[in-house]
Amino acid sequence: MAETILFVLMAMGALVGAVAIVAARNPVYSAMGLLGTLFSVAVLYVLQLAHLVAAVQVIVYAGAVLTLFLFVIMLIGVDKSEDWDEKLPYQRAFVGGLGGLIVLFAGALTVFGNFDWVPAATNTIPEATNGTIQAIAELLFTDWVLAFEATALLLTIAAAGAIGLAHHRTGQT
Amino acid sequence: MIVAAGWYMALAAALFVIGALGLLLRRNALVMFMCIELMLNAVNLTLISAGRALNDLNGQVAVFFVLVVAAAEVVVGLAIIVAVFRRRATASVDELSELRG
């Protein structure tokens, strides 16, 4: 019962935040919507016993990524309001209708179709130790070690690329 | 498991579609980036709920890699946005049509 209530609350929070990202005129409000969505999704991770992922989500996304977003928004300037005047009058309405149809389809499949999203899904109760650091680390450093190494390379390249892009060459601009 | 995996999947689908809509509708590069983050989060939620339904930890490990890729993408993307802004003083992708054929 507690899981149901929390799920409904957090799903609503996530959806409201997501709509706020898209609908807000001011990018700062979009960032706040993203913050709400990220926290709600983190709570949903906890509901699914993915405790470590939830912690990492809050630390990395809400801590680092969102701070970076806000920093860039402040750097660029918050008063640059977007021009909503239409050069393409029907496209936005068309895309919005299409998206609504897709969401309705997913909802209808869940509610009415009793759709089997995960074919081999069983009613086994996952162990409480499912999402611990130890359990994940064992997988990470055995089966996924090549991807782990590739990730290190990717992060190095990203950091080097960001420094290269941000480096201001005087006299060249 | 009281809440079935399908509900999590439906929520993830809704979040993904909202993110995709934002990507198509908005013209501010920063907001478009936030929408990409939203879509990545929706996929993460799918992976986690599928992993729980199948009682398999690999879903959670995959989420870690998605997180890392998202972080790297944000770093480079925001650097590009700042570099573009320094030259053109705009964050709207409509203004950036220099590369068209």
Image: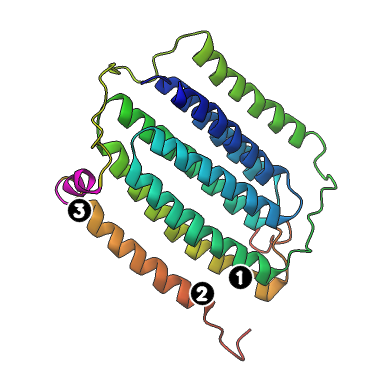
The image shows residue A16 at horizontal and vertical percentages of 65, 37
Which region of the structure is painted magenta?
Answer: A133-142
Return the x and y of residue A159 as percentages of the image width and height.
Answer: 41, 70
Determine whether A172 is above or below A155 in the image: below
What crowding class fits label 1: few (fewer than 14 Cα within 10 Å), some (14-19), or many (20 or more)?
many
Q: Along the line of sight, which residue is nearer the eye, A160 or A89?
A: A160
- Subunit bearing disc 3: A
Query: On the image, numbered disc 3 is attached to which residue?
Result: A146
Q: Which mark is residue B37?
A: none
Q: Residue at x 30, y 58 (%)?
A: A151
How much space separates mark 1 and mark 3, taking CA atoms?
33 Å
| SS majority, magenta | helix
Residue A86 position within the rendered picture, expressed as x and y whole percent measured from the top left = 83, 44
Relative placement, left or right, of B89 versus B12 is: right
Residue at disc 2, secondary structure: helix
Residue contact at pointers 2 and 3, CB within 8 angstroms: no
